Image (cartoon, helix red, strand yellow):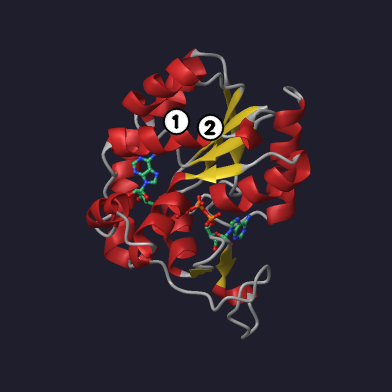
């Protein structure tokens, strides 16, 4: 299955893409993680991307399209993959359609209020990208996968989070309609409708159920 995880910043795309990747044994491809790795390695692409990411803006379409095209051509994508954070504009979705066949676009839906709370309470692993809620870490601020000390993401500062949400509504939310018209969209609510969290396990069950139709 070739799956897209759509959704605003903090909706849980990375959290659930990790779960589904392990369940179906297909790679989890996060453009955000690839770009952060490029920044850490100080590549030309990374240095260019950093200017946009630190301000909460989108990296230019062609930069991410080239990254994804190259990644999807790798052998481990032959039996399926999960795209997390790509596409993020209609132009990216149109281009993706020229070199990939998408089976389902899963849209994680949440209120902006919950997203702001989540992002301000998140730490991530700089090595593998795994996200954690500070409140659930119990004082041990290291990655449970590889023991790397966790960090606060540069773009999780409150003013940058506001900008990311604004950019999401303007540029990425139109993809809900785009994939809806193609008959590929499945919506999954990640809050209880009044702004409160639903446990990760419950959201994971909803996602698995939505995907069973396509498996
Ligand atoms: P990216 O890294 O893709 O960030 P994002 O889309 O803003 O999403 P996040 O990673 O912030 O959140 P998430 O939805 O993965 O949630 P998470 O699982 O961590 O992109 C960063 C930047 O890169 C962009 O702003 C842009 O500049 C650039 N970029 C990337 N792709 C691009 C593209 N295609 N085009 C152009 N530019 C691009 O969960 C959030 C928190 O909630 C965590 O702490 C988690 O533990 C917690 N949580 C999750 N589920 C639950 C639950 N059910 N209950 C309680 N807590 C939960």
Q: In which quarter of the image is the N terminus?
A: top right
Q: Which residue is the site of mark 2?
A: 72
Q: Which residue lies furthest to the top in this view?
A: 182
Label 2 close to label 1 by CB (< 8 Å): yes
Q: Which residue is the site of mark 1?
A: 69
Q: How far apart are marks 2 and 1 (CA)?
A: 5 Å
Quick check: 130 left or right of 165? right
Indicate whether 153 appears above or below 73: below
Question: Foreground residue, 125 or 11?
Answer: 125
Question: Foreground residue, 170 or 88?
Answer: 88
Q: Where, by quadrant of the figure, is residue 47 drawn?
A: bottom left
The residue that appears at 24% across and 52% down in the rendered structure is: 48
Beta carbon of the mark 1 residue lies under 8 A of ligand 1? no
Across and down, in percent, residue 206 comes to 71, 39
Indicate whether 139 appears above or below 175: below
Across and down, in percent, residue 36 comes to 40, 57
Quick check: 55 left or right of 129? left
Across and down, in percent, residue 158 comes to 32, 66
Q: Which residue lies furthest to the bottom in this view?
A: 139
Helix, strand or loop at label 2? It is helix
The residue that appears at 70% across and 29% down in the rendered structure is: 79
């Amino acid at each position: 299955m070739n799956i897209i995880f759509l959704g605003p910043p903090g909706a849980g795309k990375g959290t659930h893409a990790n779960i589904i990747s392990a369940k179906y044994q297909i790679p989890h491809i996060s453009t955000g993680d690839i770009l952060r790795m490029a920044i850490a390695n100080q590549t030309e692409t990374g240095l260019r991307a950093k200017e946009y990411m630190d301000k909460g803006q989108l990296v230019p379409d062609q930069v991410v399209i080239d990254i994804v095209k190259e990644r999807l051509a790798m052998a481990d994508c032959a039996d399926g993959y999960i795209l997390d954070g790509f596409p993020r504009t209609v132009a990216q979705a149109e281009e993706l359609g020229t070199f990939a066949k998408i089976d389902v676009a899963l849209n994680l839906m949440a209120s902006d209020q919950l997203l702001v709370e989540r992002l301000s309470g998140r730490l991530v692993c700089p090595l593998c990208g795994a996200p954690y809620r500070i409140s659930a870490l119990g004082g041990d601020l290291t990655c449970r996968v590889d023991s790397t000390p966790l960090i606060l993401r540069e773009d999780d500062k409150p003013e940058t989070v506001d900008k990311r949400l604004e950019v999401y509504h303007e540029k990425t939310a139109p993809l809900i309609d785009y994939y809806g018209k193609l008959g590929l969209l499945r919506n999954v609510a990640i809050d209880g409708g009044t702004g409160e969290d639903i446990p990760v396990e419950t959201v994971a069950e909803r996602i698995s159920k939505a995907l069973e139709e396509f498996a």
